[in-house]
Image (cartoon, rainbow, N blue to C red):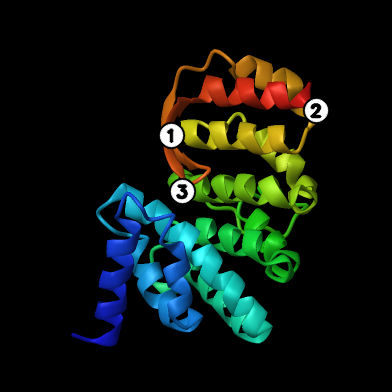
Amino acid sequence: MSRFRSVKKSLRDLLGGDDWQDRLAELDEYAPGELVPPLLNLRLDRSEAVRWRSVTAFGLTAGRLAEASMERARVLMRTLMWYMNEESGNLGWSIPNFMAEAMVHSERIAKEFHKILASYIFCDEECDGNFLDHPELRRDVYWGLARLAESRPELVAPSERFLLIGLDDPDAYNRAYAARVLGLLRAAAARDRLQALTDDPAEIRTYLHRELVDTTVGEMAREALAALE
């Protein structure tokens, strides 16, 4: 068995177990660079839980990599950006989640790359954005901005006007995530539009605080409103 397959199997066994959080320290047994390829592969795993948990593991790995070598961390982030480029021929699924989780675990990565993550929802001519037309890909960006706003809200705040637009997105996930980010930012300008979403019954299944959660757009809007109080 190749080293890649061996590491991937070990990671999948770790992330697929009920005790996965207790075992995250086992990631330190590997060099960060050795974990990156299999984690990128696991973002497309058949198991929803493994897919999401690979995001958590990647953030921890990117943080370690940045501590050891910021230049290698920059190469990693640029690789993720390449995945988001149509010319790469790769699938961008979960890549914004990985980018955001890396920023959560490394302040230096966050300061250098947060504008790139936000640019994927920039949707007017005044901003030099990389707006994603595909609504399901935008989900990962909104989720990523919410994750980053949990720990570094000042880096997400400049994107407020585009997040407000997200509240009207036809996609339920995008509405819900935009509401969550605006709540985390304590964005008073969102109050009326969040109120209008409180009865939105659309259901979503997402990953919050390392747990899979079933909720609705309305519930997330109500939580965001509560954060404004």
Above or below for 76 versus 210: below
> Is residue 79 toward the left or the right of residue 109 in the image?
left
Q: Nearer the viewer, residue 196 or 64?
A: 64
Residue 217 percent across, percent down from the top left: 52, 25
- Helix, strand or loop under label 1: strand
Circle 3 residue: 134
Circle 2 residue: 189
Q: Name the quadrant containing residue 213.
A: top left
Residue at 30% x, 82% y: name it.
Answer: 4
Q: CA distance from mark 1 to mark 2?
A: 27 Å
Q: Residues within 10 Å of mark 2 (few under 14, many from 20)?
A: few
> Is residue 214 toward the left or the right of residue 180 in the image?
left
Q: Amino acid at mark 3?
A: His
Residue at 54% x, 52% y: name it.
Answer: 132
> Is residue 211 toward the left or the right of residue 62 in the image?
left
Label for residue 48? none
The quadrant the N terminus occupies is bottom left
The quadrant the C terminus occupies is top right
> Is residue 226 toward the left or the right of residue 33 in the image?
right
Residue at 57% x, 26% y: name it.
Answer: 220
Circle 1 residue: 213
Q: CA distance from mark 1 to mark 3?
A: 24 Å
Please report whichever mark, 1 or 2, sits nearer to the chain's N-terminal start: 2
Q: Amino acid at mark 1?
A: Val
Above or below for 219 versus 8: above
Q: Residues within 10 Å of mark 1 (few under 14, many from 20)?
A: few
Q: Amino acid at mark 2?
A: Ala
Answer whether labels 2 and 3 touch (C-beta < 8 Å).
Answer: no
Q: Name the quadrant containing residue 197.
A: top right
